Amino acid sequence: MFSLDRYADIVQALRHENLSPRSTAGEEHREFREAAFAAVRLTQLANWKPQRIQPVDLVSDVAKPWSLEIATIVTDIPLSEAKRLLPLATDIFNAAAEPFDTQLQDNAKHATLNLAQKFSSPAFQVQAFVALSQTLPCFLANAWHALLRRPDQIDKLHYPTAIDELLRYAGPSRAILRYAQEDVRIGDVEIPKGATVALVLAEANRDHEQFSEPDRLDLTRQPPRHLAFGLGNHSCVGAWLVRAASIHATQAIISVLADATIVECTLDERFGIQSLKSLRIR
């Protein structure tokens, strides 16, 4: 397997027509985006207000239930049904986190088929449900952890690029796979047809050639052109939903983050994902 971690190389790889995911769904992705913009108005997310929270585990008690609530708004299903379907979304997410585990891949295929039967517009709603119930809480946990460690940045959350800098610095996507349909040259690397290529997005987002002081969180950074959602035709189709929801959820929790202290933090680091299993505060 080949591995790329330079920002410039990964941008080239993501845009290369002969490097694709295992299953290409370009037309489905376009249909999803069109349906998403038609079916979901951002005012729904803007009007969403979380309940006041107490010092708790920000992952299990805040990020996950908030994200599931937003998923119900976007997909228009009752919360009780969303909770019942959550294990299927988790199976799909786990397969992306561990793409070399054949059992997880089989689980994801069955879960996708089962979820598709539960929604009236599966091309849109299945992907939205997985993105919001799985990817969103991972990013919220990472972003809140970053802000807790850098409380001097909290008062800069009003900057237009703040969420994009958090995505660059603390995005949950660690790496994704692409497969060479033909012989491909990326930078100095010759990739033969049929080869598997790991695109290490997390490393690219900290590339010193692209970003000044890349290991420093700076919510005023201009402009943080991150690769947290990939790039090009096969980028994350739920990216704009995750981004929009993250803005409102993070703004809602600012007062909690400003006064909190981290008590315990447990990492969840797999091939495709870097996030937190727990983030307890007081």
Image: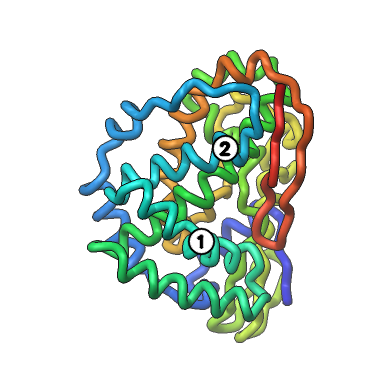
* Residue kind at label 1, given as amino acid type: Pro
* Residue kind at label 2, given as amino acid type: Leu
Residue lying at 76% horizontally and 43% vertically, measured from the top left: 266
Is residue 159 visible in the rendered image? The answer is: no
Q: Which percent across, then down, holds residue 178?
A: 58, 71
Q: Give me the disc on residue 189.
A: none
Residue lying at 55% horizontally and 34% vertically, measured from the top left: 62
Residue that label 1 marks = 87
Label 2 or label 1, whichever lies nearer to me, is 1
Residue lying at 43% horizontally and 36% vertically, measured from the top left: 245
Q: Which percent across, then down, holds residue 123?
A: 31, 65
Q: Which element is circle 2 on?
A: helix
Tell me which corner region of the image, top left, top right, bottom left or bottom right, holds residue 119.
bottom left
> Does the residue at mark 2 contact the one at mark 1 (Cβ under 8 Å)?
no
In this view, 247 is above or below 205: above
Asked whether 185 or 123 is in front, the reply is 123
Residue that label 2 marks = 140
Asked whether 78 or 245 is in front, the reply is 78
Q: Is residue 249 left or right of residue 103?
A: left
Asked whether 100 or 109 is in front, the reply is 109
How packed mark 1 is, by other alpha carbons closer than 10 Å (few <14, some 14-19, many 20 or more), is few
Q: Which element is circle 1 on?
A: helix
Q: In this view, does 113 lie to the left or right of 134?
A: left
